[in-house]
Image (tube, coloured by chain):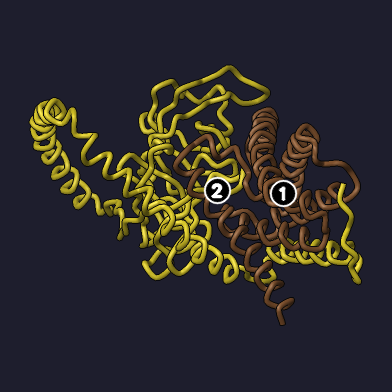
Amino acid sequence: MTGRISTLGLIGKFAISLIAVVVVQGILAYRLRVFGYFDLPLILSVYYGFTMGRPIPSVIIGSAVGLMQDSMSGAPMGTNGFSKTLIGYLAAMAGSKFDVDLPLTRAIALFLFTVGDGVLVSILGQMTGVAPNAKLGSTLWTWLVSGAFNALLGMLMFGYHDRINHATSR
Amino acid sequence: MRTIVASKKPAWITLAVALVFHTLLLSVQSSKRADTSFLRGWLIDSIGTLEKVVDAPVEGIENVWKGYVGLVHVNRDNVKLQAENDQLRSELARRDEGALELTRLRQMMGMQAPEMGKTVAARIVGKSPSLTGQALTIDKGIRSGVQRDSTIVTRDGVVGRVISAGDYYSVVQLIIDSQSAVGFIVRSSRRLGILKGTGGNELELEYIDDDNDIKQGDEVITSGQDQIYPKGLTLGVVVFVGPKQGNFKVVRVRPSVNFGRLEEVLCMTEHLPEISTGQAQ
C-alpha cells in the first residue's frame, strides 16, 4: 500500500513538473523575448534522463512534454513528441553508460541534443508538409544560439540539483 | 555513472511503442484521416488556463508599475496628446467628408463596402513553448466565437490567424512565423503577391521580378485572395528592395504590428463573404 502511494506520488511529481515547465516556458517566452531561445522541455527531458538513468520513465516524460509543446506551438501533434521521446531515451542511456556528472559533459550533451532536436523537428515538419520558409542560415543560427543558452541554463539547473543531493546525503 | 534499475520489460519496447504512437499521430494528421483537434483543444484549454492563472500576478505587478511609477511624465504627455488630439479632430472632419463621398459613389456603382465583421477582444496569456513556431496563446476560444482561421488584428494591423482553437483558449500563428503566408496588395501600385514570414522580425515578398515597381516605403495591405485574411488590413511597410537573386528580387517588409509589445488583440469571429470581383482592382 505504501509502495503504491509512493509510486503515485512520484507520478504526480513528474506530471506537475512537466506541466509547470510548459507553462513557465510559455509565460517567460512571452514576457522576455530572449527566453524564446530556451527550451525548458528539452532541458527537463535531458535532466530526468541523466539523473534517473532509467529509459522507460525518460521515454514517457519526453513523450508527454513533447505532446504538450506541440499543442501549444501549433506544430503537427507528434513532431516534438517524437523528438523528445528519442532525446529522453538517449539521455537515459547516456546517463547509465557514461559519466555525465562533469559540467562540461552535460553542457556539450545539452548543446548536441538541442541541435539534434532542431534538425529532427525540421525533418518531421518537411515530411508532414509544413516546411518552414526560413533560410537555412538563420535556422542554423537559431539552433546554435538555443544550444548555447540551453547548455548554460542546464548547467545551472544540474548544479543546483547536485547541491541539493549533496546537502541531503550528508 | 549510474546503473540501470532492473526492469522486467526492455526499455527499447517502450521506446518503440512511443515512437510508433507519434508516427501514427503524424501520419493521420498529414493524410487528414483522423481529427486530432479534440486532443489539441483539451491540452490548449488545460495549459492555457494555468498560464492565465500563473501570469495574473505578473500582470498585476506590471499594472501597478504602469499605473503609479509610470505616471511620472503624465503631465508632459498630456500636453502633447492634447495638441495631437486637436490636429486629429480637424483631420477626422476632413476624412468624414471623404468617407461620405465614397459611400455615395459606392451606392451609385452598386459596390459593397468592405466590412470588418464582428470582433471579440482577447488577452495574450503565453507564447509558443517551442523554438520553431512563432505562436501565441489567447484567452478566447470556440465558446467566444473564435474558430480555426479566424483573423487576429490590432489597431496597427494584422497579427495572424488562429491555427488551433480550444473551448476557452486558442493558439494564434503570427504572420512572422516561418510557415505563414498572406496574400498582399501594394497600396500604391496595386501589385498582388504572397507575403511570407521568415521566423525573424521581418517578412518577405515572394516572386517579385524586375517588372514590379515596388520601392522602399510602400505600404502593403491584405488582398483577401488567400480566403483567410479579409481585404484591406495593414500588413507593413517595404523596408528593403534588393537586387535580383536568381529569378526574383529580395523584398523585405517590416510588420506594422510590434510583436514584442502585444498584450490585447481583436479576433474577427465572423467570416466575411468572398471578396467580389468588383472590388478587386
Q: Residue furthest bottom?
A: A1
Q: Who's brown, chain-wise?
A: A
Residue flagged by tag 2: what amino acid is it?
A: Gln
Q: Who's yellow, chain-wise?
A: B
Say if residue B276 shows up in the picture: no
In percent of width and height, residue A108 lies at 78, 34
Task: Specify whether A72 is left or right of A163.
Answer: left
Residue drawn at x 87%, y 62% is B5
In which quadrant is the C terminus of chain B drawn?
A: top left
Chain letter for mark 1: A
- CA gap between label 1 and label 2 equals 33 Å
Residue B174, numbered circle: none
Depicted A138 relative to depicted A44: above or below = above
Residue flagged by tag 1: what amino acid is it?
A: Arg
Residue A170, numbered circle: 1
In percent of width and height, residue B195 lies at 51, 38
Disc 1 packing (10 Å; few <14; some 14–19; many ≥20): few
Residue A25, numbered circle: 2
The foreground one among B138 and B90 is B138
Q: Which element type, helix, strand or loop, lies under badge 2? A: helix
Residue drawn at x 38%, y 34% is B256
Chain letter for mark 2: A
On whether disc 1 and disc 2 are found on a single subunit, the reply is yes
The foreground one among B198 and A43 is A43
In percent of width and height, residue B80 lies at 13, 26
Q: Nearer the viewer, mark 1 or mark 2?
A: 1
